[in-house]
Amino acid sequence: MLSLENVAKQYGSLQAVHPLSLTIERGRTTVLIGPSGCGKSTLIRLMNGLIRPDHGRVTCDGTLVAPENLLALRRRIGYVIQEGGLFPHLTARSNVTLLARHVGWQGPKITSRVAELAELVHLDSDRLDQYPVQLSGGQRQRVSLMRALMLDPDVLLLDEPLGALDPMIRSYLQSDLRNIFQSLHKTVVLVTHDLNEAAFLGDHIVLLRSGEVVQQGSIDDLCDRPVDPFVREFINAQRSTLSNEVRE
């Protein structure tokens, strides 16, 4: 569904992403994981065209991610960022429906879709008429997810969507996200630094270091068959939080 071919990105003297190729398979959840500064957020921004590669090419379903295609492609790509990224001057409902109204959806279609999504993400309908400042962190993330899903995109990109939440709320949302991913069968790319979250949500895990892919595969591949000492060190640093349940 998404393909990065020999892609590289540099900021000044910092090589954020070294030349790499990566394929995101249709219909499954791919997790980009690694320490801070490893390039995972840069990769997800390359995928949705927020930034352009210095070298190489990114395609979505065979279409080049380029300025002339961005408007059409972004309607097929939902995007969720840390803390939601909601517009503070708009209600939750207005945030969710902003793009739908922009592309010309009419009232009944919008109303039906909002109700469907509120049920999907387990958000009480009375919260939709509140402003982001009136919502909890977990509620803001549910609204942000609704906004990303409003146009029923083919691809869903999530850049550390749960990173700012307290552990209990984060656990609830992880369970909800997994159920949503499994029910919608969409192509999902999720960025996290949490191995437990990656194992719980991901079908395929890509471990990055310093802008390069070190290893990719299942959680069992990384845990039981590390290809590099860094993989073993990364796993061991978080092993105490990695339960047997998420490896099943």
Image (spheres, helix red, strand yellow):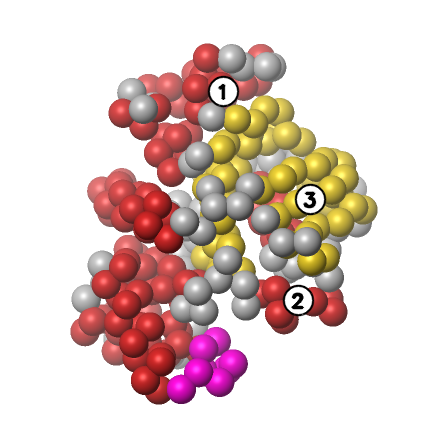
* Distance from Cα at disc 2 to Cα at disc 3: 16 Å
Query: From this viewpoint, which residue is outermost toward the right?
Result: 55
- In three-dimensional space, the C-alpha distance between marks 2 and 1, rounded to whole angstroms, equals 35 Å
Q: Determine which residue is flagged by label 1.
A: 222
Q: Name the residue under label 3.
A: 4
- Density class for disc 1 (Cα within 10 Å; few <14, some 14-19, many ≥20) is many
Spot occupied by residue 50 in the image (x, y as percentages of width and height): 64, 60
Residue drawn at point x = 50 percent, y = 82 percent: 102
Q: Which corner quadrant of the image does residue 16 belong to?
A: top right
Earlier in the chain: of badge 2 and badge 3, it is 3
Q: Mark 2 points at which residue?
A: 70
Q: Up-down: is 129 above or below 118?
A: below
Residue 93 x %, y %: 32, 76
Residues at marks 2 and 1 touching, judged by CB atoms closer than 8 Å: no
Quarter of the view holding residue 22: top right
Q: What residue range appears in magenta?
A: 99-106
Q: Residues within 10 Å of mark 2 (few under 14, many from 20)?
A: some
Residue kind at label 2, given as amino acid type = Leu
The answer to whether the residues at label 2 and label 3 have Cβ atoms under 8 Å apart is no
Mark 3 residue element: strand
Residue ID at (46%, 41%) = 29
